[in-house]
Amino acid sequence: MTDVERVRALFRASIATKEGAAAPLAPVVARAAAVMLSALRAGAKVLACGNGGSAGDAQHLASELVNRFERERRALAALALTTDPSVVTSIGNDRGYDAVFSRQVEALGRPGDVLVAITTSGRSPNVCAAIEAAHRGGLRVVLLDGRDGGPAAGLLGADDVEIRVPAESTARIQEVHLLVVHCLCDLIDNHLIDEEEPK
């Protein structure tokens, strides 16, 4: 296989994964957006966390909410728990890496907020700990995961939302996660912009 053929094959694999995910994920993505929108309308905030590429997705989500997605609207309260190296490294040093997100949820989360937890495998101990801290603090959880959902999926309650990508490849799951982030932002924007437009 040439490099060009390999690139085309990767494109086809990504497209096939997205097409396979569209039908099962559309209703849960819409539900997750409604959960986040309800919190934001009430003056609450969105906290987001993940490791590696999922950390990038968490930061991407927060930036789109705070600033803008594709259309102008008011700023929304969102924070990625991955972006302050002093906080992350001090917690990691003193309490262990498993606590880097949960400690921040305890400090910053308030009842009515939403935690968006992102893990391709569902097996990240620090993400699982963040979900547990969110529940203790009265936050709802939106979980973006893949494969079999792992331990993280087992931590969810009836008021939480799981967006599980039906795939095994980390790369394909991450590609769908990014699309899900954009879908969430699009749905939130459309509702808020409609509300803000002069009648």
Image (spheres, grey):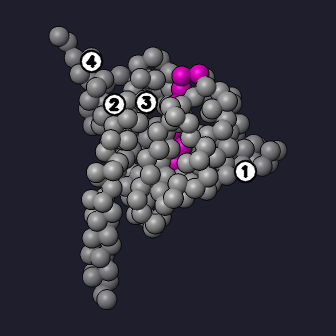
Mark whose residue sits in front, 1 or 3: 3
Identify residue type, mark 1.
Answer: Tyr
Label 3 near label 2: C-beta < 8 Å?
yes
Q: CA distance from mark 1 to mark 4?
A: 41 Å
Q: Of the residues shown, which amino acid type is indicated by label 4?
A: Glu
Identify the residue at image location x=33%, y=50%: 24
Residue for badge 1: 97
Label 2's element? helix
First in sequence: mark 2 vs mark 3:
3
Q: Amino acid at mark 3?
A: Met
Mark 2: give few (<14), some (14-19) or many (20+) Cα within 10 Å. Answer: many
> In this view of the protein, which residue sits in the foreground, 165 or 4?
165
The furthest residue to the bottom: 1
Q: Is residue 111 visible?
A: yes
* Residue with the mark numbered 3: 36
Q: State yes or no: residue 115 in magenta.
A: yes
Residue at the far top: name it: 199
> Residue pushed farthest right?
94
Crowding at dot 3, Cα within 10 Å, few <14 / some 14-19 / many 20+, comes out as many
Q: Which residue is mark 2?
A: 188
Tell me the magenta residue range: 111-118
Name the front one of labels 4 and 3: 3
SS for callout 3: helix
Amino acid residing under circle 2: Ile
User: Which residue matches tag 4?
Assistant: 195
90 or 175, nearer to the observer? 175
> How would you rate the neighbour count of disc 4 (Cα within 10 Å): few for under 14, some for 14-19, many for 20 or more?
few
